[in-house]
Amino acid sequence: MRPDLAEAAKTFRLATGPARWRGRSGNRRGLGVGSSQEFLDFRDYSPGDDLRHLDWRGYARTDQLKVRLFQEEVAPHVDVVVDGSASMASTPAKERATRDLVQLFAAWAAREGSRARCLQAGGGDLGDAERHAFAGGAPFAAPGLLLRQRGLRVVVSDFLQPDDPAPALRRIAAGAAGLVVVHLLDPWERQPQELGATTLRDCESDAWLEVQLDARTLTAYQGRLQRLCEGVQHAVLSLGGLFVAASAASPGELCRRHLLPAGVVEPAA
């Protein structure tokens, strides 16, 4: 791992909030009964229960044997769903940021004691994030593999496609305890400059287009981009998720400028 990436992974950690998770043994609140110090509930005593957990004070008052139950603590499952289309590598900075985000979430999951699964949107296992070849332009879709229940689902995509991503996001979010969607764009994609007569190439279809990048064209583009961003944000918020509008940057900047303010990460203790 590069030094700047390792520094960001060490400086921050996942902010999992009050949700209750499923996963391996860890230190975040789980759904079930465990062995933490946090009291959860009482239940009737059954032969074989740990006598250390008997509620003797309650027995003195009610003459009924009750057992104290304590909160389970887990390391949440983390499933990272990555848009593997060619537009995610339309610029070196955007490609680098995509790969960095995958590795950061995997590192944060490992710190919790979990193991992140990195999956390709509309496909299977992403494999090595550093070696994945971003290619093609298939519509954004849920992965072909089952996502783990009551875990954290992370989506990284630019959503630059004609189809509405909301149905796919609903399928990805189904059964999750938490959803994070990082809408990643290159700074130039967010704020292109006037260049006059320009030839553009669609990196997914390889089609070429002659355009005038003048004020009128850019105004129309900004309007369409705003509608796209607002549509994705609305879909994510309606699912109870966290939406992050991120511009490609260094790992530290991605964390400080985008993930931290959105409540996705917090300073590591």
Image (tube, rainbow, N blue to C red):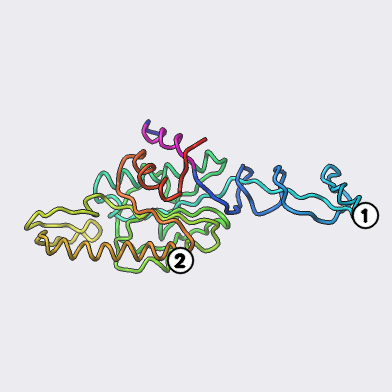
CA distance separating discs 1 and 2: 49 Å
Q: Is residue 249 located in the magenta-colored stretch of the structure? A: no
Side of 66 relative to 137 (left or right): right
Q: Which of marks 1 and 2 is in front?
A: 1
Residue drawn 40% across the image and 63% down it: 141
Side of 125 relative to 38 (left or right): left
Q: Is residue 12 located in the magenta-colored stretch of the structure? A: yes
Residue sitting farthest toward the left: 197
Side of 89 relative to 266 (left or right): left
Residue 14 placed where, x, y %?
49, 44
Q: Name the residue under label 2.
A: 238
Q: In this view, does 118 lie above or below 205?
A: above
Q: Magenta part mainly helix, strand or loop?
A: helix
Q: Residues within 10 Å of mark 1 (few under 14, many from 20)?
A: few
Which comes sooner in the sequence, label 1 or label 2?
Answer: 1
Residue drawn 82% across the image and 45% down it: 53
Residue 85 placed where, x, y %?
32, 56
Q: How crowded is mark 2: few (under 14 residues within 10 Å), some or many (20 or more)?
A: few
Secondary structure beneath dot 2 equals helix
Q: The N terminus lies in which quarter of the figure?
A: top left
Q: Nearer the viewer, residue 209 or 154?
A: 154
Q: Which amino acid does label 1 sit on?
A: Asp
Residue drawn 33% across the image and 50% down it: 246
Q: Which of 229 and 165 is in front in this view?
A: 229
Q: Name the residue under label 1.
A: 63
Label tally: 2
Secondary structure beneath dot 1 equals loop
Residue 80 placed where, x, y %?
45, 51
Q: Point out the stretch of residues depicted in magenta.
A: 4-13
Residue 120 placed where, x, y %?
41, 54
Side of 90 relative to 108 (left or right): left
Q: Which amino acid does label 2 sit on?
A: Ser
